[in-house]
Amino acid sequence: MKKIRGFCCNLLIVCVLLLFFAEGRAASSPACYPICGVQDGCSAVSAPSDSLKKSKKSSKNKAPYSKRKGRVTFETFDENYARAVNHYNNHQFLSAAKLFEELYPLSLGTAHADTILFMFADCYFQNKDYEMAAFHFKDYARRYPSSDRAELASLMAIKSVYNISPYYALDQSETIYAIDELNTFIALYPHSQYMDECNKMLDVLRNKLAKKDFEVLKLYFNTENYRAAQIATDNFLKTYSYSQYAPEAAFILVKNNYQYAKKSVKGKMRERFEACITAYDNLVFNFPESPLVADAVKYRDEAKKQIEKLNKKHK
């Protein structure tokens, strides 16, 4: 009897364990959801709410290019061209330039292209962005050489570089470039209606180079670097004989040669006093009306006296 009771207890325990194990497996099994659509009365699982919002936002940002506000397209070309010209005429050059920049690629091959590029370049010029203005005006002259505006565009490119030319004491590469461009323009358009304007710009630019070299020769003279001053002044008078600084440079050469002779060894004095007299003669010949001639006489006269003394000693 005890054996039967023990057997029944063990059997009961085994049944309980099997039942518990079966329930555990059922709980851990994944739910079976339909992949799509509706099956056997079971509706499909919808996407998470945050993904849905993101999807709606993404599709909202992908509006067609032509419907984006303020963008220039073929469909809105005429409207935006009219806006750009209106900005330009009202001196709103920055707003006009932004529109012209977008309009130009769409205008290629049309009657509007050269007008847009010219006005675009002029917007930069009017805003005093001379580097960009020079670039676009030159680009215009290159692209549309047969246009009625080609000559004016070339001139405006030069005027842009002219305005970039710096203060005389700084590097004058831009000044030299502007002079070269002006000479090219004059050769290309010898009968240009802008010739007077070109000559005025040339005078200003050349005068700037003369001023720079004039200050250099003065520095040599004031620091008693007489040989360097002599060379610099000779070169200056050859290059800038027309400049407003030429008479004073010629006068400085007279003084420089006299002082150079005074501080020279005896063997070099005669030729350097003679150089002083020669410099005086050139001053009188080239600038006879200069008031500096009267001041230069004393150096010429003193140089002659010194030569006479040297001649007496030599005898």
Image: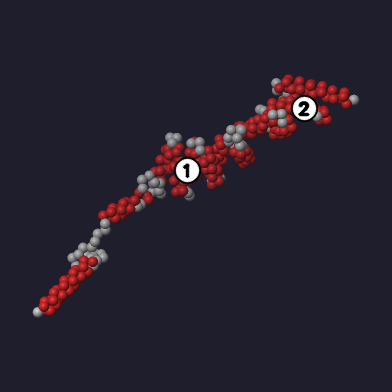
Kindly identify which numbered label has been placed on residue 116.
1
In the depicted structure, whether residue 120 falls above or below residue 285: below
SS at badge 1: helix
Q: Three-letter amino acid code at disc 2?
A: Lys
Residue at (80% x, 29% y) in the render = 265
Q: Residues within 10 Å of mark 1 (few under 14, many from 20)?
A: many
Kindly identify which numbered label has been placed on residue 263.
2
Q: Three-letter amino acid code at disc 1?
A: Ile
Kindly identify which numbered label has been placed on residue 7.
none
Q: Position of residue 283 (x, y in %)?
A: 74, 26
Residue at (61% x, 37% y) in the render = 171
Count of numbered circles in the view: 2
| Comes first in the chain, label 2 or label 1 | 1
SS at badge 2: loop
Q: Quadrant of residue 198?
A: top right
Q: Position of residue 98 (x, y in %)?
A: 44, 42
Quarter of the rendering occupied by the C terminus: top right
